[in-house]
């Protein structure tokens, strides 16, 4: 099957516009990757795109959240047990567990507001990569329909409405790794009933076995397409695990504990997430209407111990109970979204006018922080009941002024309301805030298959509701200042997208993002911490080359510069801000019965302290997939992670801790090692 430029471009234009009533064509990973890169005439920035199901199927994925690493420049890692949300890094951000990057699955937001562990907590362990049809991603605060947490970017992940065939899959690996998946989409009453059931267990390379168990399921009934049809989707996930958290480097260097050992064998957690969502879309002759509604019930019990005995020594003069703590929450949430686009002609100019409304409410009863020992509660640091409401309105106009110039101008208005009922009355109260955020995009071209983009926009992220009403530190009893409910961001971007010949595509984006204040709720301490205003800027360069119909090369490269904007004695570097990232790969598909992928992922050096005196080194890890088609429906795949068995760390921090044997605290690196070389063998049968 030859890769022809006009075929690829035509297919993507139709798919993006929603004109395909059925999406049944079986295309190779090479073809679809090319489609995802060619957004000429559709995109409004140089840093947006679509990742297809074939693209995901072609690459080895260690953890479900790593599906987001297909977003250029985004790095996904872990600092604790695999049942916990991943750590995310993008555009000079240590996004922690998801702040400033909005993620949706099946129309349901994944980011959790006022979360027990961290604002914007994004746990993607319920994701089933084999059922993902597409990931549509955007970066920067330039899109009127993107709201909270989307200043660095957003990803909309959607499952299939129907599969080409039913799927039975079994994967086995070392250290107790076992995963089974059964999925299909039979025709029922004129529609399709997509189902997926996943069973999972893994101990990992840790000396204290992780014992991560996961039960995960999806059920979706749909008719039509995402552009003209409807669906109802239910998802259910439960998981529990024992966690090996990051360890002080001095404990490893002294031989007190192995790199894969634990300083507290009782840390870990258990979680659940149940959701139900419905979406509806209708295409008219000159319009597109969409609406969705969702409901969610979730919970988390998370036991952590990052400082070992520091607080216990300070309070009691010994290490009796240690510094373990539990973060817990029970959440009921719901929301809706509706939008309409109208296509018209004003004075000879083609225009598209869009407007929409989005709403969300979260009730947490309770959300708390507790001092524990061996998972037994010793005392309550704080416990709250929180209700958070938000409403967003947006409008956007796109006008094509000439054959080579179009503009997109939009505005968004958001209002938030917080009610906190705390166990300490001084921290109870109500707060509200509202923000207006304008957007503008200018698109020039195409000229010789090249488009240029200039973008400007404001965005925001919400802060933890408890920080908006707090007056007393729950641990020390000292007075503290409240924080603003909403924090403004402002970005600008210059981008280009070019097609060179029939086989090479390249995009580049130069960007800058300012944040008024990086205010974060510190879940480990139960208090709110305000940091300084910041500025980040950088460049991203994404390339794709297909020298043959069975071979593709891709290279996603990113560089960023992140600093606090004001002067302070401690320095102006932002801890955890990665300078360089790279995701390089070669993909082979339809090479006889063989297929495979080789991927190099580079996670660059970064400061660990504000004065840049302590830095983490760069990490380069290589993953390999080799596959063979036994027949039309049966495949065998071997995935090798950390192919060269690099001794590296998934993440590093610099902070103060105290070991049980120490008489005083010490500042040190705290590391979580990358997993050593591991192999997984998969048998996949479609029937």
Image: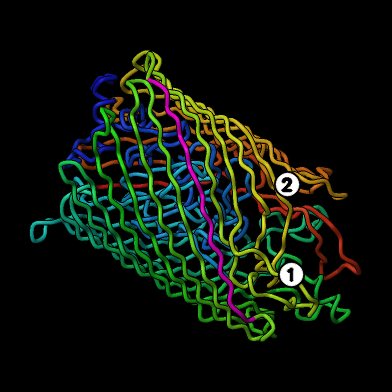
Per the model, the C-alpha gap separating discs 2 and 1 is 22 Å
Q: Residue at x 58, y 55 (%)?
A: 205
Q: Residue at x 64, y 36 (%)?
A: 537
- In the image, taking residue 121 as reference, residue 668 lies left or right, namely right
Span colored in magenta: 428-445
Q: Which residue is mark 2?
A: 574
Residue 118 visible in the snapshot: no
Which of the 4 quarters of the picture holds residue 400?
top left
Above or below, 193 against 13 in this view is: below
**Which secondary structure dominates the residues rendered in magenta?**
strand
Q: Residue at x 24, y 23 (%)?
A: 7
Closer-to-camera residue (233/474): 474
**How many neighbours does mark 1 have within 10 angstroms: few (below 14), some (14-19), or many (20 or more)?**
some
Which of the 4 quarters of the picture holds residue 375?
bottom right
Local secondary structure at mark 1:
loop
The tag earlier along the polypeptide, 2 or 1, is: 1
* Residue 613, label in figure: none
Residue 20 visible in the snapshot: yes
Extreme residue toward the left, this view: 189
* Residue 481, label in figure: 1
């Amino acid at each position: 099957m030859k890769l022809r430029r006009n075929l690829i471009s035509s297919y993507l234009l139709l798919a993006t516009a929603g004109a395909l009533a059925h999406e049944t064509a079986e295309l190779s990973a090479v073809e679809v990757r090319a489609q995802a890169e060619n957004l000429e005439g559709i995109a409004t920035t140089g840093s947006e795109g679509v990742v297809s199901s074939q693209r995901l199927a072609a690459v080895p994925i260690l953890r479900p959240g790593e599906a987001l690493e297909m977003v250029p420049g985004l790095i996904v890692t872990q600092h604790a047990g695999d049942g916990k949300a991943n750590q995310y890094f993008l555009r000079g951000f240590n996004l922690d567990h998801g702040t400033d990057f909005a993620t949706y699955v099946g129309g349901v937001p994944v980011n959790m507001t006022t979360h027990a562990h961290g604002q914007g907590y994004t746990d993607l362990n319920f994701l089933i990569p084999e059922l993902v049809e597409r990931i549509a991603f955007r970066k920067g605060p330039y899109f009127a329909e993107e709201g909270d947490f989307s200043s660095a970017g957003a990803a909309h992940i959607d499952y299939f409405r129907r599969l080409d065939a039913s799927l039975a899959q079994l994967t086995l690996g070392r250290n107790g790794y076992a995963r089974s998946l059964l999925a299909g989409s039979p025709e029922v009453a004129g529609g399709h009933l997509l189902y997926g059931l996943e069973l999972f267990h893994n101990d990992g390379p840790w000396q204290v076995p992780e014992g991560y168990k996961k039960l995960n399921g999806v059920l979706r009934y749909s008719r039509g397409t995402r552009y003209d049809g409807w669906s109802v989707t239910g998802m259910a996930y439960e998981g529990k695990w024992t966690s090996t958290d990051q360890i002080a480097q001095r404990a490893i260097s002294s031989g007190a504990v192995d790199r894969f050992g634990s300083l507290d064998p009782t840390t870990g957690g258990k979680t659940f997430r149940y959701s139900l969502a419905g979406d509806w879309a209708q295409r008219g002759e000159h319009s597109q209407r969409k609406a969705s509604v969702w409901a969610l019930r979730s919970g988390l019990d998370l036991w952590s111990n990052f400082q070992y005995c520091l607080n216990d020594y300070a309070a009691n003069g010994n290490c009796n109970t240690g510094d373990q703590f539990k973060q817990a929450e029970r959440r009921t949430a719901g929301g809706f979204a509706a939008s309409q686009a109208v296509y018209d002609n004003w004075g000879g100019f083609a225009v598209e006018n869009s407007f929409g409304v989005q709403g969300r409410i979260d009730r947490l009863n309770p959300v708390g922080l507790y001092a524990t020992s061996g998972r037994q509660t010793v005392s309550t640091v704080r416990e709250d009941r929180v209700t958070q409401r938000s409403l967003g309105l947006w409008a956007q106009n796109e006008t094509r002024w000439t054959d080579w110039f179009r503009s997109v101008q939009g505005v968004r208005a958001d209002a938030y309301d917080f009610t906190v009922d705390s166990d300490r009355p001084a921290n109870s109260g109500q707060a509200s805030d509202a923000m207006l955020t304008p957007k503008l995009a200018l698109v020039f071209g195409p000229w010789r298959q090249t488009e240029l983009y200039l973008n400007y926009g404001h965005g925001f992220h919400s802060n933890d509701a408890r920080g908006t009403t707090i007056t007393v530190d729950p641990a020390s009893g000292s007075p503290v200042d409240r924080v603003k409910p909403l924090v403004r961001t402002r970005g600008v971007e210059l981008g280009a997208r070019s097609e060179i010949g029939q086989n090479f595509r390249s995009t580049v984006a130069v960007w800058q993002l300012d944040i008024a204040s990086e205010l974060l709720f510190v879940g480990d301490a139960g208090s709110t911490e305000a940091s300084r205003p910041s500025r980040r800027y950088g460049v991203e360069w994404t390339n794709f080359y297909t020298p043959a119909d069975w071979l593709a090369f891709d290279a996603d490269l990113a560089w960023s510069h992140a600093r606090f904007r004001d002067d302070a004695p401690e320095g102006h570097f932002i801890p955890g801000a990665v300078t360089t990232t790279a995701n390089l790969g070669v993909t082979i598909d339809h090479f006889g019965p063989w297929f495979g992928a080789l991927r190099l992922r580079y996670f660059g050096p970064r400061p660990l302290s504000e004065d840049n005196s302590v830095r983490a080194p760069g990490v380069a890890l290589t993953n390999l997939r080799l596959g063979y088609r036994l027949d039309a429906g049966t495949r065998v795949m071997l995935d090798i992670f950390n192919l060269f068995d690099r001794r590296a760390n998934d993440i590093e921090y610099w902070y103060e801790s105290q070991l049980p044997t120490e008489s005083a605290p010490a500042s040190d690196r705290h590391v979580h090692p990358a997993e050593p070389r591991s192999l997984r063998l998969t048998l996949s049968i479609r029937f």
